[in-house]
């Protein structure tokens, strides 16, 4: 019922993201594209759908292509349900399950069972680990942290870390700000 099928794309989200990344105002984009500020505002807020020629004019004004804007668009779905029973689970088998579909500001994954303990991670943005069941050991900034059921670990963006399950059938939820989000403060922009 609430499961996602084919949803129309929300291209306005991609337009706004691109415009803000370039630090442009709607007025500048309007001037460059020949489109009105009210129309561009409606596009960004999903109250108007641009025609293909209008989308190409917007893309040109943003230094990209209409195809790239469409590829970066979010599905027009603000609620999405992933069912736990959509996958067959084999007891004792390690697996990773995405908890969020698509290109969003957050990524969430569930790790069950053993994990590749030798692999080091370093994410651009912040991350939170929640131990649903079992136990893990996380090595970060030269320290080992032992976590058990119900514990959380917060890691700032850029912190190198690795982790491993220390108990069979451990379940860990990892939620992270997506790498395409510019959540790290740029010290060169501070005045």
Image (tube, rainbow, N blue to C red):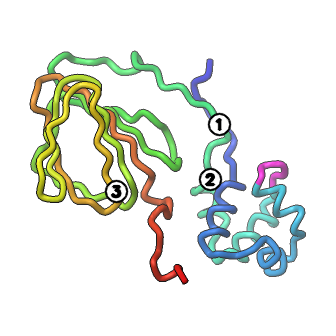
Q: Earlier in the sequence, mark 1 or mark 3?
A: 1
Q: Pointer 2: what residue?
A: 73
Residue occupied by mark 1: 77
Is 18 within the magenta?
no
x and y percent of residue 154 in the render?
Answer: 32, 46
Q: Quadrant of residue 117?
A: top left
What is the magenta range?
45-49
The x, y position of residue 16, in whole percent, is 68, 62
Residue labelled with disc 3: 156
The answer to whether 133 appears left or right of 167 in the picture is right
- The local secondary structure at tag 1 comes to loop
Q: Tell me where residue 110 sits by quadrant.
A: top left
CA separation, marks 1 and 3? 29 Å
How packed is label 2: few (under 14 Cα within 10 Å), some, or many (20 or more)?
many
Marks 2 and 3, the one that precedes in the sequence: 2
Which residue appears farthest toward the front when viewing the image?
191
Is 42 drawn above or below residue 191 in the view shown? Answer: above
Viewer-nearest residue: 124 or 30: 124
Residues at marks 2 and 3, CA–CA distance in whole angstroms: 27 Å
- Mark 2 and mark 1 in contact? Answer it, CB < 8 Å: no
Disc marking residue 109: none
């Amino acid at each position: 019922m609430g499961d996602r099928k084919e949803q129309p794309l929300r291209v306005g989200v991609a337009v706004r993201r691109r415009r803000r990344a370039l630090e442009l105002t709607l007025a500048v984009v309007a001037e460059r594209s020949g489109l009105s500020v009210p129309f561009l505002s409606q596009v960004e807020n999903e109250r108007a759908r641009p025609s293909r020629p209008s989308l190409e004019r917007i893309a040109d004004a943003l230094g990209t292509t209409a195809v790239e804007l469409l590829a970066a668009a979010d599905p027009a779905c603000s609620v999405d349900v992933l069912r736990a029973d959509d996958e067959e689970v084999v007891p004792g088998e390690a697996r990773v399950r995405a908890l969020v579909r698509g290109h969003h500001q957050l990524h969430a994954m569930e790790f069950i069972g053993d994990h590749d303990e030798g692999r080091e991670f370093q994410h651009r943005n912040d991350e939170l680990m929640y131990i649903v069941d079992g136990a893990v050991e996380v090595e970060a900034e030269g320290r080992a942290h032992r976590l058990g059921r119900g514990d959380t670990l917060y890691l700032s963006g850029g912190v190198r870390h690795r982790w491993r399950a220390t108990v069979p059938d451990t379940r860990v939820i990892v939620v992270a700000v997506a790498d395409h989000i510019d959540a790290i403060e740029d010290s060169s922009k501070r005045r």
